Image (cartoon, helix red, strand yellow):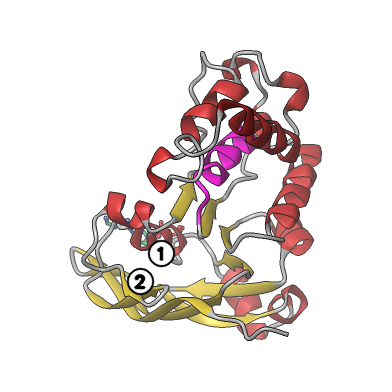
């Protein structure tokens, strides 16, 4: 088997807000092709961690290497151009446009792979395939505003995938979903994980169990432990911080 490559290396990452350390010496690394779930009680620093990865928040200390490049000095759009794509917790789709039109707008011409080099036919094929992946083929031409909450989330995941990210970040994407939608989202993420590197931040433990291969637990801005879902679930340190929160 081919040797796995680390896509992300984070060392001693610290983020202070007015002296309060939202992240406090976090170490983290991720292999290319991995699906990683990051959990932790409220206030553990999960959102801040993603904010650093997208350049929204700048650390006080530490190193963040993405494909060997230091992200710390880069602006948000530069990091996005390097291929880090984030789907936020709340949907940000264009409500008046159809899922098909939303996806069309998301294929990123800057990367040269799609809109510019592909003919209209190829673009249509790509969009058809993506609609199929996110389960919206049958609703491709209605206004996105009429989709259910879950369907909007899937559309937005599709919009990030259309940009062909090297690393996909998902922020509590099943919040507010029905059980059925949550399960379908798990299947979607498993299927995307076949050819994408993904970091998921999550609260819903049933969902974590469904998708997780390796889980990272944050606590008070640092790494508490890592392992399979079963390993971390039974770790006394994890039980303690969850019971205490
Ligand atoms: P999580 O996503 O794990 O719930 P966060 O990353 O949102 O945790 O927050 C970690 C801690 O940092 C929390 O105590 C939060 O109140 C604090 N925090 C986050 N953002 C800011 C900010 N912009 N200013 C001050 N404190 C913040």
Q: Position of residue 108 (x, y in %)?
A: 44, 40
Per the image, label 2 sits on a secondary structure element best described as strand
Quick check: 77 above or below 71?
A: above
Q: Name the residue beneath numbered marker 1.
A: 49
For the record, the magenta segment spans 152-165
Q: Residue 24 vs residue 223: left or right? A: left
Q: Name the residue beneath numbered marker 2.
A: 23
Q: Is residue 187 magenta?
A: no
Quick check: 45 above or below 100?
A: below
The overriding secondary structure of the stretch rendered in magenta is: helix
Front residue (pair 156, 7):
7
Q: Residue 77 vs residue 165: left or right? A: left
* Cα–Cα span, label 2 and label 1: 7 Å
The image quadrant where one finds ligand 1 is: bottom left
Quick check: 77 above or below 69?
A: above
For the N terminus, the image quarter is bottom right
Residue 185: which quarter of the image?
A: top right
């Amino acid at each position: 088997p081919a040797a796995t490559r680390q896509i992300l290396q984070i060392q001693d990452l610290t983020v202070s807000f007015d002296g309060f350390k939202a992240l406090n010496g976090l170490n983290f690394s991720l292999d290319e092709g991995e699906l990683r779930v990051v959990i932790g009680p409220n206030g553990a620093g999960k959102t801040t961690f993603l904010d650093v990865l997208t350049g929204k928040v700048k650390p006080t200390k530490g190193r963040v290497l993405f494909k060997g490049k230091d992200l710390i000095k880069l602006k948000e759009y530069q990091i996005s151009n390097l291929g880090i794509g984030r789907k936020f917790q709340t949907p940000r789709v264009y409500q008046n446009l159809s899922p098909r039109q939303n996806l069309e707008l998301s294929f990123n011409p800057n990367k040269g792979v799609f809109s510019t080099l592909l003919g209209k036919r190829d673009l249509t094929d790509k969009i058809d395939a993506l609609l199929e992946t996110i389960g919206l083929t049958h609703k491709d031409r209605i206004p996105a505003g009429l989709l259910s909450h879950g369907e909007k989330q899937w559309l937005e995941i599709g919009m990030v995938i259309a940009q062909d990210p090297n690393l996909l970040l998902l922020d509590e994407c099943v919040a507010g979903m029905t059980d059925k939608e949550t399960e379908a989202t798990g299947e979607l993420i498993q299927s995307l994980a076949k050819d994408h590197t993904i970091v998921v931040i999550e609260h819903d433990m049933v969902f974590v169990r469904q998708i997780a291969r390796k889980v990272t637990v944050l606590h008070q801005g640092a790494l508490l432990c890592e392992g399979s879902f079963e390993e971390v679930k039974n770790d006394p340190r994890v039980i303690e911080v969850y019971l205490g929160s």
